[in-house]
Image: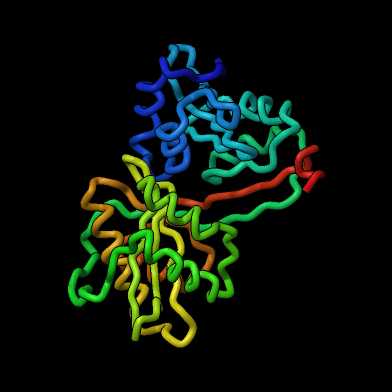
């Protein structure tokens, strides 16, 4: 049986999601931030015949994210999505999204697959020679933003003000290094919640690469987040970057997919 989730379902929902905190970074974060009933956010649950919650479907703005640890009513989730003309994307773990997408009636417009990796221990982290790694404050964000703009592969539309707001809210943090007063490398978190955080924005300014600077920032950032009891996760589609992450303790969970669909909303874009 599928029905809308409410605050009364919170304990069951958290019990299902928390053992997979890294995999459910976005769902957990959105529940903590916005609860179960907002104009821009809704959640549904799939319950077994015994009344046990076995799967969750989140809609946040124009994006649906399904999660299930085992068997669930994929066709039922797909029916909810198919009846919605005001969405753009379905994203999530490949093994879950593929089951749901097989029943969605809207045509797929595009699909992207990335590696999804997590780290939940500090065993491979080295804390030597990290004295030059700094923790960014709001006053440092304009310089971090300038670094991001200098990286060709970065295409984020996030503004300085948005970065500062996210840092103040505690849903992101940035570690960085400078040389001769210039920020040359940085690594950040995003979507931080009480259980997990995502690594984003790992970058080094052209001319300063392959010197280990980004790895130092990652080491310090990962250690601090992990010792707070949170799991870390990240996306990547670059095998070279993947090798760096594996050396410091990340392991692949599986693939993460992002599929856009041909809906009335998509046609407006």
Q: Is residue 90 above or below residue 47?
A: below
Report the front residue among 95 and 238. Answer: 238
Q: How is the image coloured?
A: rainbow
Number of marks in the rendered image: 0
Across and down, in percent, residue 95 comes to 54, 42
Residue 57 visible (yes or no): yes
Residue 233 visible (yes or no): no
| Residue located at (39% from left, 52% from top) | 167
Across and down, in percent, residue 226 comes to 26, 52
Across and down, in percent, residue 173 comes to 36, 56
Furthest toward the left, the residue is 128
Seen in the image, is 105 located left or right of residue 223? Answer: right
Q: Is residue 181 above or below residue 264?
A: below
Quadrant of the rendering where the N terminus is positioned: top right
Q: Is residue 100 above or below residue 225?
A: above
Q: Please identify the quarter of the rendering in which residue 21 is found.
A: top left
| Residue located at (39% from left, 47% from top) | 171
């Amino acid at each position: 049986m599928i029905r809308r989730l409410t605050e009364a379902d919170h304990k069951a929902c958290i019990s299902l999601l928390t053992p997979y905190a890294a995999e459910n970074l976005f769902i957990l974060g959105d529940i903590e931030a916005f609860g179960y009933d907002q104009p821009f956010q809704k959640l549904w649950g799939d319950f077994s015949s015994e009344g046990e919650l076995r799967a969750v479907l989140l809609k946040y703005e124009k994006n649906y994210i399904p999660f299930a640890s085992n068997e669930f009513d994929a066709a039922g989730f797909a029916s909810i999505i198919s009846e919605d003309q005001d969405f753009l994307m379905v994203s999530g773990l490949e093994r879950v999204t593929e089951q749901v997408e097989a029943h969605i009636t809207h045509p797929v417009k595009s699909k992207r697959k990335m590696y999804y990796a997590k780290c939940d221990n500090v065993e491979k982290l080295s804390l030597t020679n990290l004295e030059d790694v700094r923790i960014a404050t709001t006053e440092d964000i304009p310089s971090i933003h300038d670094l991001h703009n200098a990286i060709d592969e970065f295409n984020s539309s996030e503004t300085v003000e948005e970065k500062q707001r996210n840092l103040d809210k505690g849903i992101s943090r940035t570690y960085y290094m400078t040389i001769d007063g210039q920020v040359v490398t940085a690594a950040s978190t995003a979507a931080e919640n009480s259980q997990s955080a995502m690594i984003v924005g790992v970058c080094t300014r052209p001319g300063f690469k392959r010197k280990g600077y980004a790895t130092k920032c990652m080491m310090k950032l990962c250690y601090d987040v992990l010792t707070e009891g949170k799991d870390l996760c990240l996306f990547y589609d670059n095998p070279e970057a993947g090798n760096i992450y594996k050396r410091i303790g990340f392991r692949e969970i599986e693939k993460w997919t992002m599929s856009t669909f041909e809906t009335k909303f998509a046609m407006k874009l």
